[in-house]
Amino acid sequence: MQAELEFEREHSFEAQELLAKIVDLATKMTTEFHLDMSWSDDYRSLNFESHGGMTKGLTGTLHIASDRVQMVLKLPFGLRPMSSTIRTEVEQYLDETIRR
């Protein structure tokens, strides 16, 4: 069974500006957490999964709406002890990226 971490941020960006910010966020997270990412729903959902390293088994989805961004991370058993650290880092990434 996996633990879930949920995040949500409101935004007031135009679609293209927000997409550029999400791509920046995805790049940072890919490097930090060793994630494979793919877009779906016409660039409204970013799906990610880690296949190696310390984050192996981490999966999640980032959904983009016109006024908010929502992210759900699913942590495998081995990452549960690090959930507060992961939460803090993701919160920081989101705050730096999504908020003006």
Image (cartoon, rainbow, N blue to C red):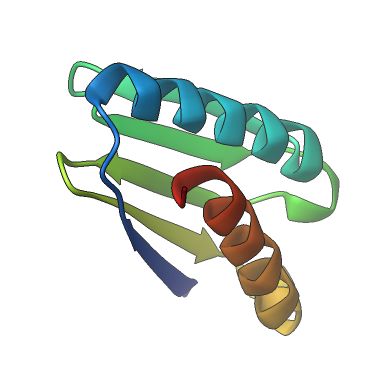
User: Looking at the picture, how far across and down is residue 62, in whole percent?
Assistant: 37, 44
* Viewer-closest of 28 and 2: 28
| Left or right for 96, reference 1 | right
Q: How many numbered marks have been drawn onto this rendered protein structure?
A: 0
Is residue 70 visible in this depiction of the protein? yes
Task: Identify the residue at horizontal 45%, vertical 47% (top origin).
Answer: 98
User: Looking at the picture, how far across and down is residue 68, in whole percent?
Assistant: 24, 51
Query: Quick one: which residue is furthest to the right in this view?
Result: 53
Task: Identify the residue at horizontal 75%, vertical 75% (top origin).
Answer: 85
Placement of 78 over or under 65, stated as above or below: below
Q: In which quarter of the image is residue 49?
A: top right
User: Looking at the picture, how far across and down is residue 11, in whole percent?
Assistant: 30, 49
| Left or right for 14, reference 53 | left
Task: Identify the residue at horizontal 66%, vertical 77% (top origin).
Answer: 83
| Left or right for 92, reference 73 | right
Q: Quadrant of residue 46?
A: top left
User: Looking at the picture, how far across and down is residue 20, in whole percent?
Assistant: 46, 20
Query: Quick one: which residue is furthest to the front in this view?
Result: 100
* Viewer-closest of 13 and 8: 13
Placement of 18 over or under 92, stated as above or below: above
Is residue 58 visible in this depiction of the protein? no
